[in-house]
Image (cartoon, rainbow, N blue to C red):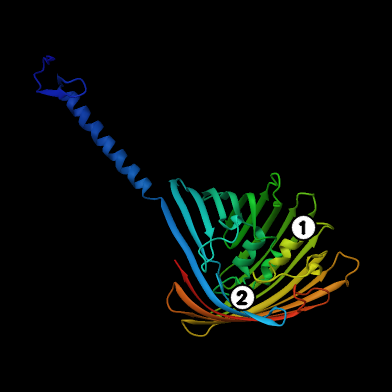
């Protein structure tokens, strides 16, 4: 079919209907403008998409470790899947939506580098959250995340400058109420050198992670001070109230930190045993007295010194006291922990380390084999990407 155009413009093919249609010069001009507008819109849309990023990151860490008194009268030799850091693989997602608003998401999987598998189903996604960030109002995150105790410790007064704690020997993490909480809603905001967080986790059935907490910290590059409080409730309604405060000082190659932490347990709390295990390395367990806790306090302090561009030396000491709930046990038990590390960086991503540690219990607490003293040493290799 042909359509007559009285203005005499050339015919054009209409493929949609398999017809030839005449367009006026005015209509042709309008079509050109529309095409240009669509091209500009497509270009701007592509530019917006270009602001999104998906980053794959991770750590692979393995170490040969030697431990004394690991078994009755025997030492133990093994390859541990994480000496300084637990091996992990993560995905970090940021989408810039314009106007100072960003969409965020993070998924982080933990694995054992010696076997390539996870030790338990809960280790698969150690973090899994989605959130929004506003340049004016801060961040809101929803999902499984680090809690406020862990956040303030690792960001403000970590035990070592080049690694916040030793994965295979981490007494300080035992007072962080499990380090993570499920079903969490967390708000984060920063005002100059002051940073704050508020968090809440729903219990949701059989979860032991119902919690409420907050942190406040100050950091200016030289001095750092902070504190946090978290209350966790188990499925029976029993509570653990955890508090920590501390500070750090950085001057050139020198880093010094000092911290205090306390856990108070309701009688009969189901969380006692789980929070005790974090004070020891992954290959350790204590007797029943170690899981009978009314109150536990820990003081710690240490320093890291960057001797050369590649070599860091660090040492840290922890002293803990524990009041028991069982009337048959002595009122108070004590524990002393010490660790020293030499870390050599081959590059920005790959380092080797030599670590030694020593543990001593006093009072009713002992390892399962009855020993109250234990030493350890390891040499390992870590790659971060």
Q: Is residue 330 rendered to the left or right of residue 155? A: right
Q: Residue at x 28, y 40 (%)?
A: 40
The quadrant holding residue 341 is: bottom right
The residue that disc 2 covers is: 249
The residue that disc 1 covers is: 240
User: How many angstroms separate mark 2 from mark 1 (CA)?
Assistant: 30 Å
Name the mark nearer the viewer: 2 or 1: 1
Q: Quadrant of the N terminus?
A: top left
Q: Is residue 236 rendered to the left or right of residue 318? A: right
Which mark is drawn over residue 33?
Answer: none
Front-most of residues 1 and 274: 274
In the image, farthest residue toward the right: 327
Residue 84 can be seen in this image = no
Image coords of residue 227 (percent x, y)? 69, 64
Front-most of residues 314 and 155: 314
Image coords of residue 297 (percent x, y)? 77, 69
Front-most of residues 34 and 366: 366
Image coords of residue 261 (percent x, y)? 73, 67
Q: Is residue 315 above or below residue 141?
A: below
Q: Quadrant of the C terminus?
A: bottom left
Front-most of residues 223 and 121: 121
Q: Of helix, strand and loop, which one carries label 2?
A: strand
Q: Which mark is first along the chain, 1 or 2?
A: 1
Q: Of helix, strand and loop, which one carries label 1?
A: strand
Q: Residue at x 20, y 32 (%)?
A: 32
Image coords of residue 100 (percent x, y)? 47, 48
Q: Residue at x 68, y 70 (%)?
A: 172
């Amino acid at each position: 079919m042909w359509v007559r155009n009285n203005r005499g413009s050339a015919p054009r093919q209409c493929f949609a209907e398999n017809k030839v249609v005449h367009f006026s010069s005015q209509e042709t001009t309008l079509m050109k403008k529309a095409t240009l507008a669509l091209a500009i819109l497509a270009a701007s849309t592509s530019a917006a998409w270009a602001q999104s990023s998906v980053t794959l990151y991770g750590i692979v860490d393995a170490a040969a470790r030697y431990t004394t008194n690991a078994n009755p009268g025997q030492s133990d030799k093994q390859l541990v899947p994480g000496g300084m850091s637990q091996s992990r693989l993560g995905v970090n997602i940021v989408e810039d939506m314009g106007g100072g608003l960003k969409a965020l998401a993070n998924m982080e999987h933990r694995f054992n580098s010696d076997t390539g598998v996870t030790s338990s189903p809960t280790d698969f996604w150690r973090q899994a959250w989605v959130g929004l960030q506003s340049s004016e109002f801060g961040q809101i995150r929803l999902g499984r995340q680090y809690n406020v105790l862990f956040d303030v410790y690792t960001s403000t007064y970590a035990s070592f400058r080049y690694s916040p704690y030793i994965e295979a020997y981490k007494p300080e993490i035992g007072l962080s109420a499990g380090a993570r909480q499920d079903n969490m809603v967390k708000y984060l905001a920063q005002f100059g050198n002051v940073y704050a967080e508020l968090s809440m986790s729903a219990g949701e059935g059989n979860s032991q992670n119902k919690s409420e907490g907050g942190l406040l910290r100050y950091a200016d590059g030289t001095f750092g001070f902070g504190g946090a409080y978290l209350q966790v409730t188990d499925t029976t309604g029993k509570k653990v109230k955890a508090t920590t405060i501390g500070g750090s000082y950085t001057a050139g190659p020198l880093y010094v930190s000092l911290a205090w932490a306390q856990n108070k347990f309701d009688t009969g709390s189901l969380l006692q045993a789980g929070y005790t295990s974090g004070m020891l390395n992954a290959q350790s367990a204590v007797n029943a007295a170690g899981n009978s806790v009314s109150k536990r306090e820990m003081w710690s302090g240490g320093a890291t010194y960057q001797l050369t561009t590649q070599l860091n030396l660090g040492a840290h000491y922890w002293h803990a006291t524990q009041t028991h709930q069982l009337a048959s046990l002595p009122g108070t038990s004590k524990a002393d922990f010490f660790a020293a590390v030499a870390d050599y960086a081959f590059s920005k991503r790959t380092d080797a380390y030599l670590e030694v540690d020593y543990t001593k219990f006093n009072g009713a607490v002992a390892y399962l084999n009855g020993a109250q003293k234990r030493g350890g040493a390891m040499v390992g290799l870590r790659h971060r990407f």
